[in-house]
Image (cartoon, grey):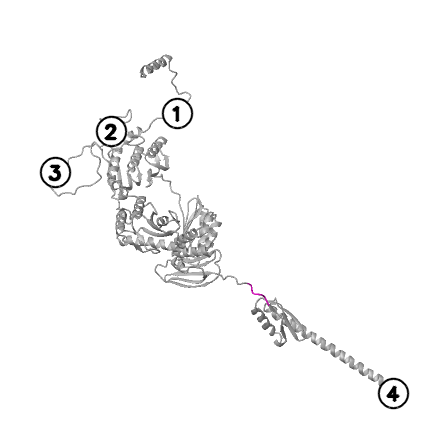
Amino acid sequence: MARKRSRISTSMATVLVLGTAGGLAWAGAEAAATFVEKRAAEDVTRALQIAGHDWAGVATDGLQVRLTGTAPTEVDRFRAMTDASGAVDASRIVDDMTVAAVDAMTPPDFEIELLSNDQGILLIGLVPAALDRQSLLAGLDAGGLPVTDLLESADYPVPKGWDPALRFGLQAAALAPQAKISIRPGEVTVAALAESREDQGRLEAALQKSRPQGVTLDAQISAPRPVIAPFTLRYVMDGTGPRFDACAAETEEARTLITDAARKAGLSGPANCTLGLGAPSPEWGAAAAAAIETVAALGLGDVTLSDADVALVVPPEVDPELFDRAVAGLEARLPAVFSLDATLQQAEPRQAAPIEFLATLTDQGTLSMRGRMADEQMREAVASFAESRFDVTESGLRDDEAVPGGWTVRVIAALEAMDTLQSGSTRVTPDIVALTGLSGDPATTDKAAAILSSRLGAGARYQLAIRYDRRLDPALGLPDGEECVARLNRIMSESAIGFEPSKSTIAGDPGPTLEQLAEAMTDCADFQIEAGGHTDSQGSEGFNAELSRGRAQAIVQAMSEAGIDTVNMTSRGYGESQPIDTNETEAGREANRRIEFRLLTPRPVRSDALDPPVTISGVTRDPDAPVEAEPDRAAMQGPQLPPVFGPALPEHGLVPPRMQGPQLPHAQTAGMVPMTVGVSEEFETLDEREENIRVPVLTPDDDTPRPGARPESVITRVGEEQTDETPAE
């Protein structure tokens, strides 16, 4: 029995040991499997996150690694599988990923890159299939150079803003012949190189003016930096405040240094500093800033940097001790290449300003004058006379008792002589009356000399320099600019000149019309005139604009080949933009198809300069002095002297033109009625004649005597006389 129990206990112990061992083995296997799954999940998740696949999920099932999630594209799904295979064996990966549904395809980005240079025009990019490529190419003005079309097309709807941007891009190509122009829906970018800053400003203004509403313009216009010689900067600080008279810098950094120093010195106005080439040193900006700061410390003065020379000029009001300290500090701050010349001006005795009268007459008839007059009464007399002859826009007359006697007479005589000019100026000094200007009368010099002789009497020195302009001569009857354009338009409206349909080739014989145009242009070639081409509304806008421009050019070319001077004539195509009649009828469309001339400026362009004036200096003589008889040259002995030429003075007895304004007595002999009561009939000096201009003016006050009431008897008698003189009805 005991032996049987022993066998049972042994068997149970064996089962217990085996069970315990199996449980431990299962637990170990479970722990190992969990560790493997966790490690695999961590490795794959890390690899996917590093690759940017945040959309992917990782799940483990034993040795298997399942990838879940929705990939944006098939490519992203494939890349996720590849990146996961780098973390675990590819055979363990199960692909449970999906791919997002593909949306309807959106239109592509349409864009044209237009490259224009001396070799021609190149077009590359993608355009809508509905675009009229022929009209596009016809709207480009390549100037005879080739146009290369490398555009691709896509059959998608035309996006909003494409058409106005395309038209504006073609206009920009015409304005900037050397440029890169990018055209996108509602946006145009123009990158061009201008010849100069002025050309850059004109191009930017023209682009902004042509930009249609709703289209964004990105103008990247640059101009080459000019070479500045000498490289100059001048900074002034005086009673009007600090300012730049000139400023140049080679770099943006140097310009910033200079302008910052000027602002700290008190400059409040514009600080225009031109970027250019030619600075004598890379430290130009530092040298200029130091010089400006020195002037600011002094409070007054000016500094000029011309290349490497620095000139500091300080007025005498500055304390000499402060000047010495400032100069020493500037010398220490200037770079080695620069040299300083500092001057403290010495106070000089003040000199009186010269006594003179100046007047300028414009070709519009406006007069500006300034100068000194004896007193208020003489000043008003001169102003009254000037206003009676001219449109006075500026009068800077002031009183000065130091003017010589007869000064007012000389001034009024000069103004009267100036009235013979179309434009000019006069300068009156105690020694001479000078008159220069332009006139349409070839005898103006003689007339001006006669007026001065008549008004000033004998012994007055004068100098005349008057040029003759045939365009101003009314005797020639030359047309003005408006008349010239009216003639040309009348000839074109009556002519039989036509063009071949949809072409710029002249149809028929233009000879008779060109003969009439040549006759009209004989006196009109000096004016700037535009030949504008116009079309009806049939066809596209771009095609009509190009067609009208070609027709206008054809007319100007035909005129030039016919021998007509077209140097000042330009051509422009307006297309269908300026109709003069309806486009709904054939007659209206025919009226709209026209060539129309337009005056660009009323001033003529002089191809040849006017002849220089012949300066004539002389001394007036008594206009009534007897003319000496010409000596008998045949009876003279000795060498024959050449005749002396000069202005033709008025003959004896010729009455000079009447003056407007104050009446001046004339230097004439007795026998004439004096123009002013009380004036002696003997010859008067300029002082005596100036006194005759003075008209005493009395201002009434309370003590001024006034006439009393008329007696009753006088009133009755006057009434009876008027009754007797009334005619019976």
Dividing the picture into quadrants, the one containing residue 5 is bottom right
Q: Is 517 drawn above or below residue 441 in the view shown?
A: below
Majority SS type along the magenta span = loop
Q: Mark 1 points at which residue?
A: 699
Q: Mark 4 points at which residue?
A: 3
Q: What stretch is highlighted in magenta?
A: 99-103
Q: Mark 3 points at which residue?
A: 632
Q: Which amino acid does label 1 sit on?
A: Thr
Give the residue furthest to the top: 713
Instruction: Give the Cα distance between marks 3 and 2.
Output: 33 Å
Instruction: Give the Cα distance between marks 4 and 3.
Output: 193 Å
Q: How crowded is mark 3: few (under 14 residues within 10 Å), some or many (20 or more)?
A: few
Q: What residue type is labelled 3?
A: Asp
**What residue do we see at 87% from left, 87% from top?**
3
**What residue do we see at 22% from left, 36% from top?**
649
Q: In this view, does 211 lie to the left or right of 569?
A: right
Q: List x then y, in percent, for residue 244.
A: 43, 49
Q: List x then y, in percent, for residue 479.
A: 28, 43
Q: Is 569 drawn above or below residue 623 in the view shown?
A: below
Pointer 3 or 1: first along the chain: 3
Q: Quadrant of the C terminus?
A: top left
Secondary structure beneath disc 1?
loop
Q: What residue type is labelled 4?
A: Arg
On residue 683, the disc is 2
